[in-house]
Image (cartoon, grey):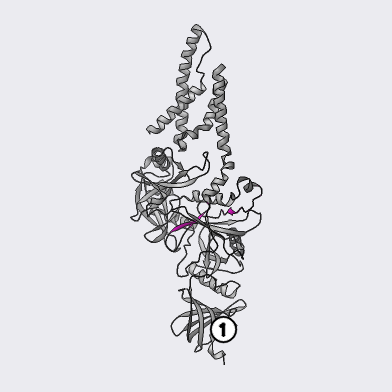
């Protein structure tokens, strides 16, 4: 507490010296009486201003750098110049002009540092949409659905009426992708009666049938605590000059111990803009804190860079490509980051190595255009970002267009999509989106081609939707031959079982070979497949995706060659 008391006292004394006339131009006894009065007034003003400044910084958790007091400087120097006389008025008038100029500099910095912001946010650029390994299961449980399940399980919390569910956070824990959410105090009086919150909820982020589990773990320093036990204030007291951006987030280590983290960094210039440098990690029970640069972040922390900071960097990269004025008027080469993300307009996703990235798609600034101009993936531990443009010969639909398709598809049921993520399924750039009802409960998973929106499928699980989507690609204009990671193979064998299913104008033929492998092909790709029967000898070329039914690229029925 000493730092804030000393800081506010110094500001109070300097403010009083600026505001109250130092020199008195009276004579004799009247001058002595005036001096005594000025001293009394000075002391009162110091006390009042110190209290006001203290309350502002204590309640707001604002950084305590001298540059943060420029608005107060303008007000006080203007008042000081007004009350002063003679030379003192001139001096304080000059101080007012300096403070005013400084204020104008701070307020207009966003115009002049646009190029520097873009340079800081500039991403590596690649063309190819990253491919998805068909053997994996994409992370698919939407946060709204996870939150609803946790609320329904709130009866597991002791003294339930004291608490409410905190902010949801996704992370990798012991090899599993999970949502975590702290239990928070539901108000000041509930906090005053309890010294700590009892723990947090945990729920699978990949299995929609899983149930939330309440983990008991005492937390004293939390976002819902008050005074010096408030986590943001606790961090600020230890690091008075740090520049933070984004909310505090809960992270759980491999032993289940909860920590709160907060991202810090630097202004780009003139108290404007932000670039991430590191984070503060706080033990939620003891309050012990440690500072880490991004290069040395503990392994258990996934979201070292706050989603708010990533969203800000995306804005710099998309809007400021040719400076500030172009972002307002010409908008040449401007691309707008989507606001459809689940956390501060970005969506956390994990790659096959378990590394978390923040996903954001970019669209055109033109009204009524739902064409995607690319998407970014930002490493949540390092802040390093890559921008993917996709195939320049194709036009991709953005996330907003995907959500509109889902809304129209289920218009009678009033279902809506959430958390659209772009994948490369079978070589086709495709949107995978969770579909929720009006109460926020998960109904199905919807996949639609970004280049050919007429090709889509949905199922009760991501894998079922993926299987049906493969069929839709085979009978539509999409391609299963694209840049899929699956290895292409050839095989010959005898057909043991055949199953044919009519889908629209075509037939999907599923068959089992004598090597116990299952295959699938559409009659649109191979019209003669409708004649396939048990006992036929066939030669096939297929993609080894590792799925139960492997997609056939080419089918030859030997009996039909004669």
Q: Residues within 10 Å of mark 1 (few under 14, many from 20)?
A: many
Quarter of the image for residue 354 reads bottom left
Q: Position of residue 385 (x, y in %)?
A: 50, 55
Q: Quick check: 380 above or below 128?
A: above
- Identify the residue under disc 1: 529
Q: Is residue 31 left or right of residue 411?
A: left
Front residue of 185/516: it is: 516
Front residue of 187/530: it is: 530
Q: Position of residue 7 (x, y in %)?
A: 42, 31
Residue sitting at x 63%, y 48% = 326
Front residue of 213/288: it is: 288
Q: Main secondary structure of the magenta part?
A: loop
Quarter of the image for residue 84 reads top right
Q: Is residue 305 visible?
A: yes
Check residue 192 for magenta coloring.
Answer: no
Q: Position of residue 501 (x, y in %)?
A: 55, 79
Q: Is residue 312 visible?
A: no
| Residue farthest along the top direction in this orientation | 28
| Residue farthest along the bottom direction in this orientation | 562
Residues in magenta, as a range: 329-358
**Please, what secondary structure does the residue beneath circle 1 have?**
helix
Which image quadrant: the N terminus? top left
Q: Is residue 477 left or right of residue 156?
A: right
Which image quadrant: the C terminus? bottom right
Check residue 352 for magenta coloring.
Answer: yes
């Amino acid at each position: 507490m000493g730092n804030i008391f000393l800081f506010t006292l110094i500001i109070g004394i300097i403010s009083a010296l600026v505001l109250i006339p130092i020199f008195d131009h009276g004579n004799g006894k009247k001058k002595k009486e005036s001096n005594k009065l000025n001293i009394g007034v000075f002391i009162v003003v110091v006390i009042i201003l110190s209290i006001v400044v203290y309350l502002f910084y204590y309640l707001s958790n604002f950084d305590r750098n001298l540059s943060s007091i420029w608005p107060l400087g303008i007000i006080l120097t203007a008042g000081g110049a007004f009350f002063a006389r003679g030379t003192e008025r001139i001096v304080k008038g000059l101080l007012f002009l300096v403070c005013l100029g400084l204020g104008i500099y701070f307020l207009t910095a966003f115009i002049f540092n646009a190029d520097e912001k873009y340079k800081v946010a500039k991403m590596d650029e690649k063309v190819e949409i990253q491919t998805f390994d068909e053997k994996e299961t994409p992370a698919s449980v939407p946060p709204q659905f996870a939150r609803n399940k946790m609320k329904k399980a709130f009866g597991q919390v002791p003294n339930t009426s004291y608490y409410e569910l905190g902010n949801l956070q996704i992370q990798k824990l012991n090899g599993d992708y999970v949502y975590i959410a702290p239990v928070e105090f539901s108000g000041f009086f509930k906090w005053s009666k309890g010294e700590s919150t009892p723990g947090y909820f945990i729920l699978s982020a990949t299995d929609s049938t899983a149930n939330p589990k309440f983990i008991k773990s005492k937390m004293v320093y939390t976002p819902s605590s008050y005074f010096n036990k408030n986590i943001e204030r606790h961090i600020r007291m230890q690091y008075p000059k740090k520049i933070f951006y984004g909310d505090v987030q809960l992270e759980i280590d491999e032993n289940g111990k909860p920590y709160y983290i907060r991202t810090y960094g630097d202004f780009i210039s003139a108290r404007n803009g932000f670039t991430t440098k590191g984070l503060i990690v706080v033990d939620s029970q003891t309050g012990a804190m440690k500072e880490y640069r991004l290069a040395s972040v503990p392994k258990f922390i996934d979201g070292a860079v706050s989603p708010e900071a990533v969203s800000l960097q995306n804005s710099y990269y998309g809007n400021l490509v040719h400076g500030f004025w172009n972002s307002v008027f010409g908008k040449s080469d401007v691309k707008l980051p989507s606001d459809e993300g689940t956390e501060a307009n970005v969506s956390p996703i994990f790659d096959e190595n378990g590394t978390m990235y923040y996903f954001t798609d970019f669209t055109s600034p033109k009204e009524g255009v739902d064409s995607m101009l690319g998407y970014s993936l930002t490493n949540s531990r390092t802040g390093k970002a890559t921008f993917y443009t996709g195939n320049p010969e194709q036009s991709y639909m953005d996330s907003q267009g995907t959500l509109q398709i889902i809304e129209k598809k289920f218009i009678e049921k009033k279902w809506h999509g959430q958390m659209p993520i772009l994948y490369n399924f079978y070589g086709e750039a495709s949107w995978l989106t969770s579909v929720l009802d009006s109460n926020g409960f998960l109904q199905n998973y919807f996949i639609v081609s970004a280049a050919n929106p007429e090709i889509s499928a949905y199922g009760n699980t991501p894998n079922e939707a993926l299987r049906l989507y493969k069929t839709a690609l085979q009978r539509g204009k999409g391609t299963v031959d694209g840049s899929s990671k699956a290895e292409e193979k050839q095989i010959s064998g005898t057909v043991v079982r055949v199953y044919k299913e009519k889908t629209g104008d075509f037939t999907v033929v599923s068959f089992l070979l004598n090597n116990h492998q299952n295959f699938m092909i559409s009659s649109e790709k191979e019209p003669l497949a409708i004649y396939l029967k048990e006992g036929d000898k066939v030669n096939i070329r297929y993609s080894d995706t590792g799925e139960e039914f492997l997609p056939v690229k080419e089918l030859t029925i030997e009996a039909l060659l004669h």
